[in-house]
Amino acid sequence: MIPILVGIYYLPWEGRYYACAIVFAVAAFTDWLDGFLARRLNQTTPFGAFFDPVADKVMVSVALVMLVANYSDPLMTLASAVIVGREIVISALREWMAEMGKRASVAVSYIGKLKTTMQMLAIFILLGTQPGTEYAVMGQSVLLIAALLTLWSMYIYLKAAWPDLMPKHWDKK
C-alpha cells in the first residue's frame, strides 16, 4: 500500500488528497482487522508479531515525510520528528527487552494505543486536505496532540524498562 500511497500523493490530480486519505484509511483498517482476526482466531505468528509493527511504522513515517514536505511548517516537522524518533527508540527498546526475556515489561499500553489512534486520525485528516485550509489546521492540531501522547507513551515505556536497563551495581546506591 505504501507505493500506492506515495504514487497517488504526487499525481497531478485534484482528487489526490481524498484518494490518499482513503488509501491510508484502508491500509490502517485492514492492518487493525488483520491483527484483530489473528488474535481472535489464534493465528498469530512470531513473524507477524515482529513484522506488523514495522510495516505500520514505515507507513506512518512515509506519510509524515510526505506531509512535512508539502506543508513546510516547523511545528509539524517537530511533531513528525518526535513521532518517528519515538518509534525508532521504542522499537529498539522492545527488541532489547525481548533479548533479555522481558518484553512483557514494555507491552503496548493504553496511552500507546491512544497515541496510535491520534496519529492515524491526524495523518488521515492531513492527507485528505490541502495545506492552509481549516481541516489542515485541525489535522495539525491533532498531530501536535499525537506528538504529546507520543512523548508520554515513550516515558511510560522507558520508566517500565529502566530497572532492566541500568547496571545492577547502580541499584545498591
Image (tube, grey):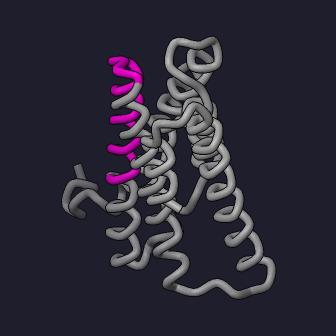
Name the side, left or right, on which 124 lies relative to 148. right
Q: In this view, does 153 lie above or below 3?
A: above
Q: What residue is drawn where x is 67% and y is 46%?
A: 22
Residue 116 visible in image? yes
Instruction: Out of 25 and 34, give the one closest to the viewer.
Output: 25
Q: Which of 76 and 166 is in front in this view?
A: 76
| Prevailing secondary structure of the magenta residues | helix
Instruction: Name the residue located 69 percent from the left edge and 64 percent from the top edge.
Output: 30
| Residue sticking out furthest to the right | 40
Q: Is residue 99 above or below residue 67?
A: below
Q: What stretch is highlighted in magenta?
A: 71-88
Q: Which residue is drawn at 40% across and 50% down?
A: 87
Left or right relative to 40: residue 49: left
Give yes or no for residue 87 being in the magenta stretch: yes
Visible residue check, residue 111 = no
In depth, the one of 55 and 1 nearer the eye is: 1
Residue at image x 35%, y 27%? 77
Based on the displayed image, in which of its 4 quarters is residue 120 positioned?
A: top right
Whole-percent x, y for residue 94 in the image: 40, 65
Asked where in the image residue 93 lies, by quadrant, the reply is: bottom left
